[in-house]
Amino acid sequence: MVSLLLVLIMIFLFSSTPIFVALGLSSFLSVILLSDIQPMILIQRLFGGLDQFALMALPFFILAANIMDVGGLSKRILRWSRALVGHITGGVAMTTQVSSMFFGALSGSSPATVIAIGKIMYPELLRKKYDKSFASGLLASSGAVSLIIPPSITLIIFGSVTGVSVGSLFIAGIGAGVIYGLSSIAYIYFYAKKNNLPKDKRASGKEVVDATAKAFWALLIPVIILGGIYSGVFTPTEAAGVSAVYALFVSVVIYREMNWKSFYHTLVDSAITTAQVLVLVAAAQVLGWILTRGGVPQQIAGYIAQNIDSVVLFLLLINIVLLILGMFMEGVAAITILAPLIYPAALSMGVDPVHLGVIMIANLAVGMYTPPFGINIFVTQTITKLNMVEMLPGLMRFFLVNVIALLIITYVPESSLFLVELLQD
């Protein structure tokens, strides 16, 4: 049954079948053809996989991200970031990276970050004489940080699949996200220095204060989310609802850039995105249940325990597998499939579960813009109108520097866990 399941998944995926169909249909066919399991049990598992309190955060964070984009929060964050770093060598590109990190902390969605930041910053990057390939690579890679920076949708999925605390994952994601962002910023500086690219005039103190004041309400969102979670005021799931209501209030009452018509369209777009994510989660939950019933996770854990006695080698193997998988599969799908398989083996090797979550998400963040099928590549192409060959040099440069950050996150656990340990103490 399990063998047929894996063969069918490969056939469906390589025939360009939608991922949720590939997972769901292969699961049902393998059970119906080669087992005595009642199909009704799979239906129950399908809906049972969505019946998790942590998953209630998804529609609210998706809605909050869309409201922030339409309601003017993203462009105010851009202006604030530019006032802070625009005068530094590579300032416009650094503004793109820093803004993506902050917008990621507001939205939790990688494609949303690429669109919100890219459509404003790409023309600016070209105007400042940045190469098109570099600019497109920057947009695709900087948006990927949203997978790591809380409130990351992918971190929520990992927590719901494995039972690891979403709050702890969020805090660990801050340190990992900063390391990821700094690796890109370091490369941006050397690239701009080498090519003698122009930079903005240093913003005056008054301009910095003005930009900060205008972005103040947007910048409060991550403070409210993380502060509320760790002060015990609300859970991560409740924080998602708070962020959506707060973003709506700021967009309608304070910035006044959202009307009821645009709010309606935002609700529709958010509902569609939520459905796309949750149907994938439901199908993957069925797949995970079949694999578990077939003893696959236990066999993998046993094989690793018998043949791999080095944590360093084990983590390297995880990185290689996830980087390859990330080239072909979106982060949520990869987590829902792989986390149940890798998690037991990692625990048997003594890997901290929160650290494992951050490692997996950081790998999949890099996969978001890795050819041939990284989703951020296609989102960036809608902005830049470049083909894959034109984008490839820029993508590969950022890939290399972000892999260095990935290795730091992997082999220096304190880089992501120190905040978790600090807050627990």
Image (tube, grey):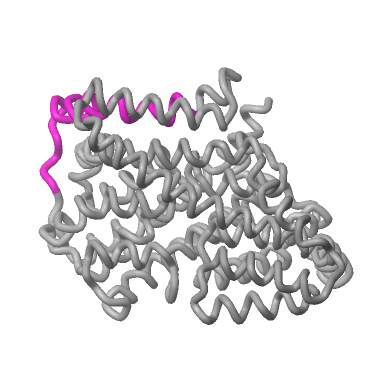
The answer to whether 14 appears left or right of 2 in the picture is left
The answer to whether 424 appears left or right of 67 in the picture is right
Question: Which quadrant of the structure image shows residue 251?
Answer: top left
Residue 336 in the image, given as x and y percentages of width and height: 63, 57
Is residue 310 or residue 41 the one in the foreground?
41
Could you tell me if residue 397 is visible in this image? yes
Please tell me which residue is depicted at 82% across the width and 75% down the height of the picture. Answer: 34
Please tell me which residue is depicted at 49% across the width and 65% down the height of the picture. Answer: 367
Q: Is residue 375 above or below residue 168?
A: below
Residue 222 drawn in magenta: yes
The main secondary structure of the magenta stretch is: helix
Please tell me which residue is depicted at 56% across the width and 26% down the height of the picture. Answer: 229
Residue 407 drawn in magenta: no
Q: Quadrant of the N terminus?
A: bottom right
Q: Quadrant of the C terminus?
A: top right
Find the magenta span and give its range.
200-225
Could you tell me if residue 410 is visible in this image? no
Is residue 208 or residue 263 the one in the foreground?
263
Q: Is residue 219 above or below residue 90?
A: above
Question: Which quadrant of the structure image shows residue 313?
Answer: bottom right
